[in-house]
Amino acid sequence: MAAITLNSGFKMPLVGLGVWRMDGKDVKNLLINAIKIGYRHFDCAAEYKNEAEVGEALAEAFQTGLVKREDLFITSKLWNSDHGHVLEACKDSMKKLRLDYLDLYLVHFPIATRHTGVGSCGSVKGVDGVLDIDTTISLETTWQAMEELVSKGLVRSIGISNFDIFLTRDCLAYSKVKPAVNQIETHPYFQRDCLVKFCQKHGIFITAHTPLGGAVANTEMFGSKSCLDDPVFKDLAEKYKKTVAQVVLRWGIQRNTVVIPKTSKPNRLEENFKVFDFELSKEDMDQIKSIDRKYRTNQPAIFWGIDLYA
Ligand SMILES: NC(=O)c1ccc[n+]([C@@H]2O[C@H](COP(=O)([O-])OP(=O)(O)OC[C@H]3O[C@@H](n4cnc5c(N)ncnc54)[C@H](OP(=O)(O)O)[C@@H]3O)[C@@H](O)[C@H]2O)c1
């Protein structure tokens, strides 16, 4: 499948399946189906609390000969409460995923919070209702521990997630192993061209999380508006004889980002993967540019009592 080459020299497939908010009981069927459709890239995280189920599905896929380990690209992420325990947290994810290496390990958020036990992924708040942030661990310290994962052969590539331009610039300054990826929320209503350009200029690939704007899931969780309902996309979908989601994902790919849509619906797995048999014209890419609302749909502040993006 179509892939890009990271600054680490490893390839990352352009479309992946995100597994956040995927019910443990659905994971096995969805992953096996996805592999049959052609997905080779899975975006996981300790905090999604379904790594054990993903691991079970992967083990079955390897045992039955459906796919080989070396043909998959598996990402996991270090949770905020484990910044002081990077090696243990990574090993815990690998154990649950039943893998002896990860393709990519990301610092999930640029913030260390109170440790709650390796892999338990707590987000403890104080009596004031505000997230307990650990001010003793710098991102540089966390990154040094991430670099050791590469030298130990546990992880092929390391990266960051939800880092803005300033934090990314800092990471470039203190890193020996440069981040291969910055995984950020970006979609037609939140295009973030400056951050995307900055990262691409410095050899950091952008993975677009929330590439469909979170659709119904984020409307339910955060009260956001979905770009899938935008009339511009309805017209484009008709024009290209594709679904709105396919046009949105195609736009993501054509701006050189990797997209990791999540779905728990088997028919949508196929739909979201069929984005390589058409191309949006320059005029249509420009039209999509004009509908940017600079609108973040994923708002962890509702869980943390503090808006870290403020
Ligand atoms: N690094 C981070 O901090 C971070 C944050 C958020 C997300 N992520 C990653 O990015 C992945 C994707 O993000 P996300 O799940 O928040 O948002 P998303 O992929 O933009 O949207 C998911 C929503 O879109 C719906 N959907 C999927 N395919 C569709 C289609 N073809 N037509 C209409 N609706 C469709 C899904 O519903 P159904 O399931 O019912 O189809 C769900 O409601 C996550 O799974 C996770 O791996 C990372």
Image (cartoon, rainbow, N blue to C red):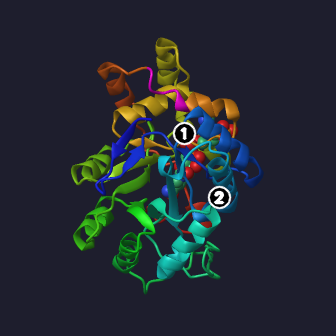
In the picture, the quarter occupied by the N terminus is top left
Which residue: 44% across, 84% down?
135
Foreground residue, 194 or 145? Answer: 145
Is label 2's Cβ within 8 Å of ligand 1?
A: no
Q: Quadrant of ligand 1?
A: top right
Q: Classify residue 105 as left or right of residue 263.
A: left
Residue at mark 1? 39
Which of the 4 quarters of the picture holds residue 38? top right
Residue 133 can be seen, yes or no: no
Residue at mark 2? 55
Part of the protein shown in magenta: 273-277
Quick one: which residue is furthest to the right in this view? 25
Q: For the residue labelled by badge 1, is the local secondary structure a helix, a strand or a loop?
A: loop
Q: Classify residue 281 as left or right of residue 128.
A: left
Q: Earlier in the sequence, mark 1 or mark 2?
A: 1
Q: CA distance from mark 1 to mark 2?
A: 16 Å
Which residue: 57% across, 67% down?
94
Estimate the x, y position of residue 117 in percent, counting from the top left. Answer: 62, 81
